[in-house]
Amino acid sequence: MSKTRAGTEGTAPKQFKAYPKYKDSGVEWLGEIPAHWDVKRLKYQATLNPESLPEDANPDHEMLYVDIGSVDSLGRILEKEELTFSTSPSRARRIVRDGDVIVSTVRTYLRAIAPIQDPEPGTVVSTGFAVIRPNEAFISGFASYALRAPYFVERVVAHSKGVSFPAINESEMATYEIATAPPAEQRSIAAFLDRETARIDALVAKREELIKLLQEKRIALITRAVTKGLDPSVPMKDSGVEWLGEIPAHWEVHPLKRAAERVQTGTTPPTSDAVYYQDGVVAWYGPGSFGNDLPLGAPAKLISQLAVADHVARVFDPGSVAIVTIGATIGKVGFMVRGGSCNQQITVITFNLERVRPKFGAYQLKSFEPILRGIAPNTTLPILDQEEIGSLPFLLPPLPEQRQIADSLDDTIQALDAVIERLRAGMKKIKEFRTALISAAVTGKIDVREEAA
């Protein structure tokens, strides 16, 4: 009996041995484990939430705060927020130490689980995490992988309660069984996984960097096409706008509102009237519908035709361009391919078709995303008003040239996106293999003791 390991790029697959003898773990989610391993409930192998900041802590106490959104699917803590006790949210309370593992108990579908290694003084995490401190027989390095194994994580997710913010009680999580090897073997497994996941993570990082570069290239190509045109030999003139620089001499520059039929904000049907959300057929977009791509992503909800008929939802035509004008994703631009409705955080431009080809207008506003973010006030809740949007300088080539630029960008972006999608698909497979490797090692499906040595 052997297990195959898919090799990284340029290497052949490798065979792992299985253990010589197995037994039934007695746990449906776990299956068989090596005969000399044990199964114990988490509460007998670790302490949960051992330390918290007191409510009467010094208001000037400085902390580095980790929220659930700061942990990615690979178990990396991406950022820490510098706060004082007096300015921190009430959930910023749980103290962590080296060797702890944090497991999200709120929004468990995010699978935000991370080991704590040499934390900086004052590091605290959200009460949305369970802080798990392994005992001497549950080696910290092994625990950090065991608590990320699918048999544990999927059980947490499946037993979480709630729709928008599914959560699990920590006392229930503490009853879940964990498979453990003898301490020396745990160390070997952890050392093996440290090495192998580091190799995999380096490969993922390279692909992420390449995707980032391709996305930057995409924006650069869009910006050049919509501000300079496709013919590098045409005469140029000063646009009169510093950040636009020179533009083709035969192009015009006008405030965006002169190129638009309407500049309007979205609307939200009263949530108290469930009938507006039943049998929904009209796409209703929110800030989460905006991404790096030009077309809007999935709508936040579907609303009913009655909401439109009762004039509690404003519907915009296909070809309109939506801009997030309130909140954290301010400045994001999306093209409404099929039209639809949206909420009040979004301003929608409907172009004058005698002056603007909608796809060209969408590409031009997409290239303005950094400018839109730059002119937004640096406040807790930044807002761009309709006047600021309508006053943006907007470039108007002749209509046939607008169509030519939009068609050219469609072809170029489609080719770039195909490359990005292949990279993402490959990266997904790499991450799936990483998860499978961790699972196989911490449940004893493969014997990595020789590999670790």
Image: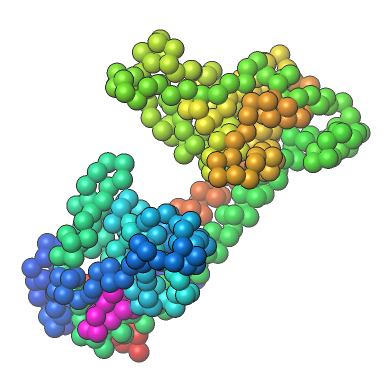
Q: Is residue 314 left or right of residue 371?
A: left
Residue 191 can be seen in this image = yes
Q: In percent of the image, x 63 and y 17: which residue is there?
A: 262
Find residue 55 and report its horizontal and vertical position in percent: 35, 62
Q: Can residue 139 be found in the magenta stretch?
A: yes
Q: Is residue 110 left or right of residue 137?
A: right
Residue 379, percent across and down?
A: 60, 44
Decide if residue 428 is in sight here: no
Residues 62 and 323: in front is: 62
Q: Residue 407: percent from the left, percent from the top?
A: 66, 30
Q: Residue at x 15, y 80 (%)?
A: 37
The quadrant where residue 250 appears = top right
Q: Which residues are magenta?
A: 133-144
Query: Which residue is pictured at 37% across the width and 69% down the height?
Result: 95
Where does the N terminus fall, quadrant-wise? bottom left
Image quadrant occupied by the C terminus: bottom left
